[in-house]
Image (cartoon, grey):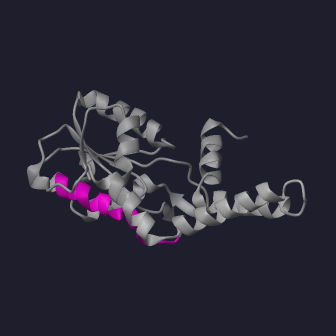
Amino acid sequence: MMDWLDLQRLITDLLKPLTLGLGLMLLGLAWRGGARWRRLGSVLLGSGLAILLLASSPWVADRLIATLERGYPPRSPSDCHPAAAIVVLGGAMQPWVQGDRRPRVQQGADRVWEAARLYHAGCAPVVVVSAGGPVEPPFQAGEAAAIASLLEDLGVSRSALLLDTDSRNTQSNAAVSRSLLAPLGADRILLVTSAWHLRRQGYRINVLADTVG
């Protein structure tokens, strides 16, 4: 049965440039077949094509990303102010596939390396891996376990890791991470995620955070 989170994801998928552009083009082609709606069909067809062309342009994509990242330049671990914990968000690795001897990294894997650098620089004694979600075949473990495995390979002590395996979106990332950190009396964290996500995540994560792009 579809819940509110599933509905949010469905709406997001429908509004993505590829889905929206193709949908408008198909609707435009259908309406152009009748004399009454031909003009509107042409507008929809042209609008869909324009969305696809703009969305597929590297020039447009690069400038949109730059706009989101501009306020969050990279920072050196040596510049950090000590905090109670490092919180690294998911989207960095694939959940552990059955039969794999090691987890598979994804585009956002630099988050894991950054979290390890902060830990080794003495910025915080604890690393919270916030990457929950359901685990179904062919996966044998969730993304949090995969990230934790890589962090251990990078020298982070297993005793320093706290895993959030239950959250399903950014808002629940914040809630579960807060509950994990509450026994430590944490009032300040280092948040590790992709710079272009920070505007959205900074809005949703209602904790005192020192953001690291």
Left/right of residue 113 with respect to residue 63 in the rendered view: left
Q: Quadrant of residue 35?
A: bottom right
Residue 44: x percent and y percent? Answer: 72, 58
What quarter of the picture does the N terminus occupy?
top right
* Horizontal side of residue 35 vs 147, given as left or right: right
Vertical placement of 110 versus 179: above or below? below
Which of 33 and 203 lies nearest the eye of the viewer? 33
Q: Is residue 4 visible?
A: yes
What is the quadrant of residue 204 in the picture?
A: top left
- Tell me the residue at 24%/38% (across/down): 189
**Residue under the image location 71 percent in, 58 percent down:** 43
- The number of discs equals 0
Tell me, yes or no, if residue 156 can be seen here. no
Residue 194 percent across, percent down from the top left:
34, 55
Residue in the foreground of this view, choosing between 75 and 86:
75
Q: Is residue 148 above or below residue 86?
A: below
Q: Where 196 falls versus 5 (above or below)?
A: below
Q: Is residue 114 magenta?
A: yes
Question: Magenta stretch: residue 202 in it?
Answer: no
Which is nearer the eye, 109 or 54?
Answer: 54
Dominant secondary structure, magenta:
helix
Residue at left offset 19%, top offset 37%? 84
Q: Position of residue 71 (x, y in %)?
A: 26, 49
Q: Position of residue 173 (x, y in %)?
A: 42, 40
Give, as a single range, the part of the protein colored magenta.
99-118
